[in-house]
Image (cartoon, grey):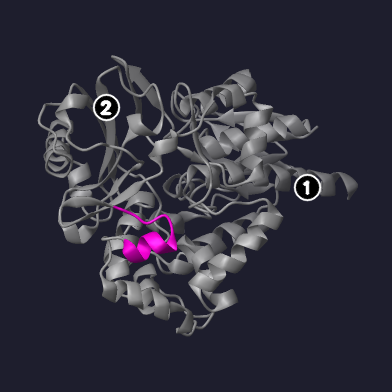
Amino acid sequence: MSRVAVIGGGITGLTAAYRLVEQGHEVTLFEAADRVGGVIQTIRRDGFLAECGPNTLLETSPKISQLLKDLDLEKRRLDPNPDSDARYILRNGEPNAMASSPMGFFTGKLFTWRAKLALLREPFIRASSSNAEESLAEFVKRRLGQEFLDYAINPFVAGIYAGDPHQLSVKEAFPKIWELEQKYGSLIKGQICGAKERKRSGTVSKDRAPKLSFDDGLQVLTDRLAETLGDRIRLKSSVNGLNRVGENEIGVKVAEETKTFDGVLLAMPAYRLAELEFPGGEKALSELSEVIYPPVASVVLGFKRDEVAHSLSGFGTLNPEVEKVKTLGTIFSSSLFPGRAPEGCVTLTSYVGGMRSPDLAMQSSEEIVALTVEDLRAIYGISGEPVFEQVFPYPKAIPQYVVGYRRFRDLMTHCEAAHPGIFVAGHCRDGISLADSIVSGAEIAERIGSYFDKISKA
């Protein structure tokens, strides 16, 4: 049995710790805050349920399904309401439904005929060199045209990364899209052929993956992990540095004390990794201080149902930058899952800030609520005042996988090679979604287990 320190109590660290305990290792998880779960936090008040961070979990991998089964959470699982599939894009000030089929795309009103014809030309556009690194905007404009960039990709990126497609690297931020072009020469051809490969591997593309939550919100997942780990978790325990103790042991400095382990997992944000002292006194990951984390505010508002003109039938609306509104988008939370609002009311979760307008996310809660209500009134025909308000500001929200981000990933890989027994995982390396982070935790636990197997056989 090996001793493993997991530093960081977000979903990656919790998942990894759980799987490492399952392998039979002696695990201690250190978390600087007074709670685990990171951005996953659910608040229930006055009959409303507010998610501070993500609203759904995408079941993209068998590793996610297995985790829920092992934690006995299947009976608490909530699948979305059947009528919540519709997604909207704001155009000319009104929510327009996104097409769910090729026929719907060509008959729908969201895109002009110029954009629709551009899609038909896509299979005949040559692929870029595999060595070239394009921004997502350059890639989309080259293959699909400006209108697709403005009314599909720009709002999509704002909804996922709170990012700017002109800065994000298509190869780093959306590797599967880049791989489709490289492997098949066409996004359309790649989507068709790639579906067969995903079926064989058991994985699901994010646009088709089942969405889920739990009866009391996503915090149910992190609470269950924390409950299972029990006293292996050390809260309010900020790790100051690492040092070598003997040939294969690593000292973890917490306050004035050093604890010794056989392996260490760093599941921390890039800006925290940049500050950490490694064996020898060096800050091996100091360059990660350059990773961009824009501020984002999550704004959960409740309204009386009869004071909202829009049907709110669907998942929500994404707002393109060209529409000149202040919010990035809105999720129809109470349409998506039951138990999110009291009888006769609705819950809407909107997002403000990101790379598009970072200053807005740094305003006071009162100002953020006011600008959000202004947008919601105009878009959804809301006449009344909010009956519930909850603002969650995140000064450093989501790491941006910008052009050139590969050097940060390479740095983390080099750090692991230079410091055997120290591992790095999480959203600054393995993908920014909740699903990515769970898979990252499961996979790094497997890799740590393999490391100890090799050590024991040496």
Q: Which residue is at the far right?
A: 457
Badge 1 element: helix
Quarter location, residue 259: top right
- Give the residue at x 44% y 67%: 170
**Which of the two residues, 339 or 349, is positioned nearer the viewer here?**
339
Q: Amino acid at mark 2?
A: Val
- Decide: marks 1, 2 in contact (CB < 8 A)? no
Q: Is residue 136 above or below residue 26?
A: below
Name which of mark 1 and mark 2 comes first in the sequence.
2
Give x and y (percent) for residue 318.
29, 50
Badge 2 element: strand
Measure how far apart labels 1 and 2 are at the Cα level. 49 Å
Query: From the viewer's perspective, is the residue at label 1 or at label 2 nearer?
Result: 2
Residue labelled with disc 1: 450
Q: Any mark on residue 346, and which?
A: 2
Give the quarter of the figure containing the N terminus: top right
Quick one: label 2, few (<14), some, or many (20+) residues within 10 Å? Answer: many
Q: Amino acid at mark 1?
A: Ser
Q: Is residue 245 above or below residue 288?
A: above
Left or right of 385? Residue 257 is right
Q: Is residue 84 above or below residue 49?
A: below
In the image, residue 375 lies in the stretch drawn in magenta: no
Q: Which residues are magenta?
A: 97-107
Q: Is residue 192 visible?
A: yes
Quick one: label 1, few (<14), some, or many (20+) residues within 10 Å? Answer: few
In the image, residue 98 lies in the stretch drawn in magenta: yes
Q: Any mark on residue 382, and which?
A: none
Give x and y (percent) for residue 281.
55, 49
Q: Is residue 298 visible?
A: no
- Give the residue at x 46% y 64%: 405
